[in-house]
Structure formats: structure tokens, C-alpha cells
Image (tube, rainbow, N blue to C red):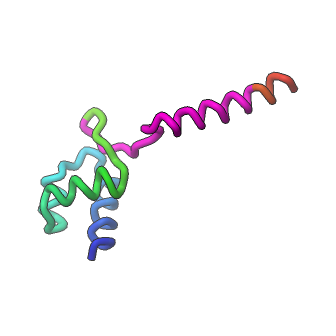
Amino acid sequence: MVTAHREKVDCMVRANRRIKQKEIANAVGISKERVHHIVTTVLGYQKVSARWVPRQLTCKAQRKDMCTQLLRLSTVFFLA
């Protein structure tokens, strides 16, 4: 049941990035709090300019790793 809710919520968010949590809750038949938990924690979306977008590079460690990888790549290309 939990995975079915997760899949329905994910499909709704992907279909309409501007959808509101209340609309999702009414369509799926679960509480707004549960929708919020699924969207933010389980699926990893966050609201940006009234749109749900996937959360990317939110952790400092992830940003550091990405920068380190880019630095290594740029050094290889620069020396070539």
C-alpha cells in the first residue's frame, strides 16, 4: 500500500510540477502530512518557485565530492 501511494504521488508530481499537496492528498486519499512526507523525504523533492523539483547536491559532502571530481577532470584536460 505504501509503495502504491508513493508511485501515485510521484506520477502526479511528474505530470504537474505545480500541483499542491492538498490536491495530491484528495486524489490519492491520504492526509496532507503523509503527502508532504512522501514528496519531501521519500521522493526527495523540494519546492522552488512554486514547483516541485528533485533535490540535488543539498549536502556539503556531495558538493565537495562533485567539485573534486570536476577539478580532477579539468586537470586531465588541461594537461592534455
Left or right: where 6 falls relative to 64 = left
| Residue 60 versus residue 46 in the image, above or below | above
Residue located 14% across and 68% down the image = 29
Return the x and y of residue 26 as percentages of the image width and height.
12, 62
Residue farthest along the top direction in this orientation: 78
73 relative to 42 in the view: left or right: right
> In which quadrant is the N terminus drawn?
bottom left
Among the 4 quarters of the image, the one containing residue 11: bottom left
**Is 9 drawn above or below residue 36 in the view shown?**
below
Residue at left 77%, top 26%?
A: 75
Q: Along the line of sight, which residue is nearer the eye, 32 or 63?
A: 63
Give residue 59's position: percent from left, percent from top.
45, 38
Q: Nearer the viewer, residue 38 or 19?
A: 38
Which residue sits furthest bottom?
Answer: 1
Residue 19 at x, y = what percent? 22, 49
Q: Residue furthest front?
A: 61
Kindly identify the residue that appears in the image at 30 percent across and 35 percent down: 48
Q: Is residue 59 magenta?
A: yes
Q: Is residue 20 magenta?
A: no
The residue at 31%/43% (across/down) is: 46
Q: Which residues are magenta?
A: 50-74
Q: Judge by depth and name the residue closer to the eye, 29 or 36.
A: 36
Question: Up-down: is 46 above or below 25?
Answer: above
In which image quadrant can residue 80 be found?
top right
- Secondary structure mainly formed by the magenta segment: helix
Q: Position of residue 23 (x, y in %)?
A: 15, 55
